Amino acid sequence: MLETLPLFINGKPEPAPPGTEFLTLEDPATGRPYAQVPLCGAAAVEQAVGAAQAAFAGWRATPVPERVRVLFRYRQILEAEADALAHIVAHDHGKTMADARGEVLRGMEVVEFACGMPSLMQGQTVSDVARGIDCHSVREPLGVCVGITPFNFPVMVPMWMYPIAIAAGNTFVLKPSERVPRAALRLAELFKEAGLPDGVFNVLHGAREAVDALLAHERVRAVSFVGSEPVARHIYRQAGAQGKRVQALSGAKNHLVVLPDAALEPTVEGIIGAAYGSAGERCMAVSVVVAVGESGDTLVEAIRERAAALQLGQGTHPDSEMGPLVSKAHKARVVGYIQQGEAEQARVVLDGRKHPLAQGEGNFVGPTLLDHVTPQMSVYQHEIFGPVLSVVRVRTLAEAVELINSNPYGNGTAVFTSDGAAAREFQRVVNVGMVGVNVPVPVPLAFFPFAGWKNSFFGDLHAHGKDGVAFYTETKVVSTRWFAGGAAGKNMTITLK
Ligand code: NAD
């Protein structure tokens, strides 16, 4: 009998409303079914948003130092539960335990950041903006905020959102990916254990129907989305048309540039982790290496050798360095791209389709390396989101920058070099929001924004950092005058006198 996952509404597990359909979840490493997740619609959305709305008045009236005390406790509980959470992620998503632990830690960093909310929410004051008049601004929470998250970071991406929203005094409804829904439930239970009042954080399962009902709900004030580009565009348009605040983080195609003077070993190690870590299912994964000048042949051979030695296996197995892809459908999509690359005359240096595990029941594809890829090929033009690394050869750094700047995405990029001036120039002229200099996956810490550009982000304020605080609060500006004897004179203008 498969476990049937509940929703988490008003501080407790709730069954999905009668008539709800279910999706069966399969272990990505074995194909074995392990749970059923409800695909909710408008009725459950009403329940979840209703609970969040009812909790809002009490939570916003809770002084901010008291609110963050709950987050301090949450931080401690998460630390104690980090391994158990990582195990859920490694099992359900397929990434390795080391990677899953890393994800939990990165999520906890956002809780730490949100614990600073009493300072982060501070407004500004100017005295005597006119005679006897002072002006100050305060940041107030919005109300019910919603998070819609992807499959590839079941813990970290939701935590980019709700700790900040909740510390700022909002209430929250999380709609996690229907492909990895269990971690979100555990995150909600642990938050309750830390003392969070009922209804402040709710988890609702589902896919498009649930999302569309959330976007249409008049009580929802703000929508944070992370996922693929077509859905990000849909969310941005729909939420915007309903007058909601929206931030939609989208797809990516990240390039890592290697200059001829780069130190070979750390460069190759960096590339291996960035391209094949989490089986390439990261929005900051490197999917294109741009080999500048003469470095190409040696580099490709060193990557091949290192990638071919990677140990594939179940995410929860301690020896695994790379796990399976999330679903059979996604495996078929990734394999399809390798086939297209081959048909378009990319040189298949390492073929993940031939890995022994790729023949079994799990969703494994081995590390794949394609050389002499050109910008016209489909493997270059699309986000593959799998362990497929393309190498594009160029003559100069300027050509590398032109290639990157012509790409419609602008999430992350990196340059590997020992030339400081070249690195500085790269960082200055490249049109990408997160840049690494000898750092292959430059994901910023929680006190900086996650700053994707171009088609990797639709919105104005990014996730976390001060942007996150601004996103989940609105500014009220108060002008004050006290009459100290004597009435003010008549003023028929808007000038403050
Ligand atoms: P996805 O777009 O399929 O799903 C994301 C969320 O949207 C899920 O909760 C899903 O239920 C919902 N959804 C799916 N289709 C929908 C529809 N038609 N209407 C409304 N909602 C819908 O993305 P995914 O496959 O889960 O995640 C992978 C994608 O996420 C990749 O493109 C990756 O680059 C991107 N991603 C981006 C970032 C970033 O920071 N920019 C971070 C992580 C992942």
Image (cartoon, rainbow, N blue to C red):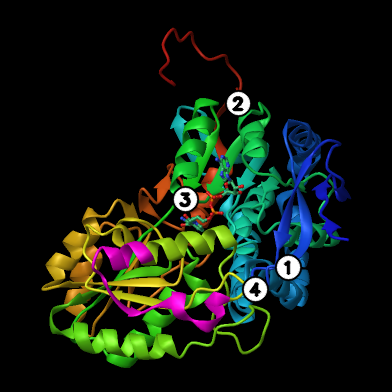
The residue range painted magenta reads 339-359
305 in magenta:
no
Q: Residue furthest left?
A: 395
Q: CA distance from mark 3 to mark 1?
A: 38 Å
Residue placed under numbered mark 1 in the picture: 32
Q: Position of residue 310 (x, y in %)?
A: 48, 87
Q: Tell me the SS state at disc 1.
A: loop
Q: Is residue 26 above or below residue 455?
A: below
Q: Tell me the SS state at disc 2.
A: loop
Name the quarter where the C terminus is drawn: top left
Q: Does residue 283 appear in the picture of this structure?
A: no
Residue placed under numbered mark 4 in the picture: 29
Q: CA distance from mark 3 to mark 4?
A: 34 Å
Query: Relative to the observer, which residue lies in front, 144 or 168?
Result: 144
Residue placed under numbered mark 2 in the picture: 482
Task: Say which amino acid is labelled 2.
Answer: Trp
Compare marks 2 and 3 and give the one earlier in the sequence.
3
Task: Say which amino acid is labelled 1.
Answer: Arg
Mark 2 crowdedness (10 Å alpha carbons): few <14, some 14-19, many ≥20 = few
Residue placed under numbered mark 3 in the picture: 462
Tell me which residue sits at (51%, 53%) in the image.
463
Q: CA distance from mark 1 to mark 2?
A: 71 Å
Q: CA distance from mark 2 to mark 3?
A: 39 Å
Tell me which residue sits at (86%, 36%) in the image.
18
